Image: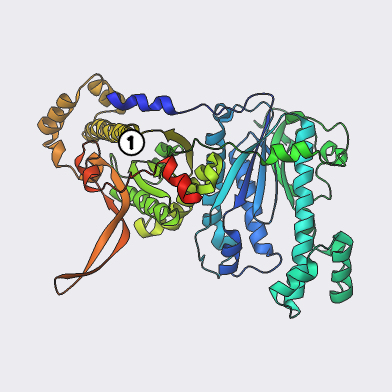
Amino acid sequence: MANSKYEYVKSFESEDEVMYPNLIVVRIDGRNFARFSEVNEFEKPNDERALNLMNSCATSVLEKYPDIILAYGFNDEYSFIFKKETKFYQRRASKILSLIVSFFTSLYVAKWNEFFPHAEMRFTPSFKSRIVCCPSMEVLQAYLAWRQRECHSKNQYNTCFWMLVKSGKSETEAYNILKGTQKQEQNEILFQQFGINYKNLPSMYRQGSCILKTEVDETVKIHDKESPVKRSRKMVKTVHSENIASRSFWNDYSYLCKELGCFEQNVNNIKHEYLKLFQSENKLLPFTWIVIRIDGSHFHRFSEVQGFEKPNDEQALKLMNVSAVAVLEEFNDIVFAYGVSDEYSFVLKKNSQLYQRRASEIVSAVVSFFSSTYVIKWKEFFPEKELKYPPNFDGRAVCYPSYEIIRDYFAWRQVDCHINNQYNTCFWMLVKSGKSTREAQSLLKGTQALEKNQMLSQLFGIDYNTLPVIFRNGSSVFWDKEMVTDNGVVAKSHKKVVVDHPNIIEDDFWGAHPLILETTSPRSLSLSLT
């Protein structure tokens, strides 16, 4: 990481490690999925293809991350459970929840055509995620029981609701008929009015889907002259069980007990304090600028596999920019974004109440929507390149309390852009000239900006200051007024998200756009709410 006088802003980042002995559960939920399912004409109350798509994405998540042992999902949600001894990304909550939701979202978009080959995806899908900390196996058992009971009750209600609607009732009439009904009454409605025995419905609808890892022994012959040897291999399988929180289910899969622990008894009633624990979330400080910074995960490998141009691939940068534009258009509270390479920083207005300032919801929603757009827009920028595998990003939220500090944050990122781009330009020009990567690193070790500029000029005839400004300055994304003229006269104006590459270290840009970081005082906001 490059050094600059602005690096003090890193001190505002807080640690969010999930401490032992807590078991880590990442729960993801569809964001605006009622609308998404309506626009894409999902079958009601359950669309088997949509559920199989969710299951396929969850399976791929377990296959990618060895530390995830079990996943349970229904409808538009999934919970992923990490082994008890996991050190995945040092157990940092924001890193874990954002990586999982980003990868799941990218998979959802990438796999869409596999499950809906004749239906173009309409409306960008995205998810929210959060960390649920389970301090004991008893608490984890209660969590799984709670989610499976929710699956049952929601599916039973939705089955009744949509059968009533399909029979000619309006949605309001169906709602009023079911208001206050209990399990037995809903069963009677289904059986008496529609001849449906609820227990005969597909188990995936009633019980949800459980995806887990097991160990299987296989016989392997290494060499022809040697005896075969037995080796254990991890396998991911999908099961549907009436009670995934029961001792009998858990004991059927010894790998769960090995990596998570065993249940001592079956759970009957879920303690109220557990439900409060499952639904509690940390909120970010009020009246501070919230910055959501996202970074590509293992993007060195991704860019290599995809054959990105070095040191900068302009199409890849433009894909990042169009994804950032989509984020600003989706979230009205985001007023500015700055991006370079495989990272982007989004700042929310100081008085934002987006998701009641719950950190995990804000971070995951932004990361997920960005990831979704990136995959959707891939073909626009790389029409001749197949997306080899879904990318993913991690994110974090940091609060900055003053105008001066938020300005210094963006100055820090742009200084970093300049220093890193200058180094990478020299490095890759040396490599392209025939030097090995080790030789290029050795030649650049300890060099300053002036020496790098001289190297580019003298060895390669490159004036660094004439390189494309998108490479040197990065990209700024913000709302601006667009004037519409009629015969040279301004007829009207409207707001539009624009991408530019200005100097955001100096005052000129901010002076020309004072509304980006305008503030509302706590007093004036409280008066407006009374």
Quadrant location of the N terminus in the rendered image:
top left
Q: Residue furthest top?
A: 446
In this rendering, would 394 be left or right of 247? Answer: left
Task: Identify residue for label 1.
Answer: 403
Image coloring type: rainbow
Q: Is residue 441 left or right of residue 320?
A: left
Q: Position of residue 41 (x, y in %)?
A: 60, 70
Residue 189 versus residue 416: which sits nearer the camera?
189
Question: Where is residue 423, by image quadrant?
Answer: top left
Q: Residue at x 60, y 44 (%)?
A: 61
Q: Is residue 4 visible?
A: no
Badge 1: how crowded within 10 Å, few (<14), some, or many (20+)? some
| Residue 139 visible in the picture | yes
Position of residue 446 measured from the top left corner of the image (x, y, whole percent): 24, 18
Q: Amino acid at mark 1?
A: Tyr
Q: Is residue 466 above or below residue 137?
A: below
Residue 46 in the figure: left or right of residue 414: right
Q: Position of residue 134 (x, y in %)?
A: 71, 33
Q: Is residue 386 left or right of residue 489?
A: right
Which residue is situated farthest in the bottom direction here? 168
Q: Residue 387 at what x, y percent from top left? A: 44, 52
Image: 497 above or below 262: below
Q: Is residue 90 above or below residue 333?
A: above
Residue at 19% from the left image edge and 26% from the top image edge = 449
Q: How many marks?
A: 1
| Residue at x 61% of width, y 62% of height | 34
Kindly state the secondary structure of the residue where label 1 is placed.
Answer: helix
Residue at the spot 79% in from the left edge and 56% down from the top edge: 153
Where is residue 131, by image quadrant?
Answer: top right
Q: Closest to the observer: 30 or 233?
A: 30
Q: Is residue 451 above or below residue 314?
A: above
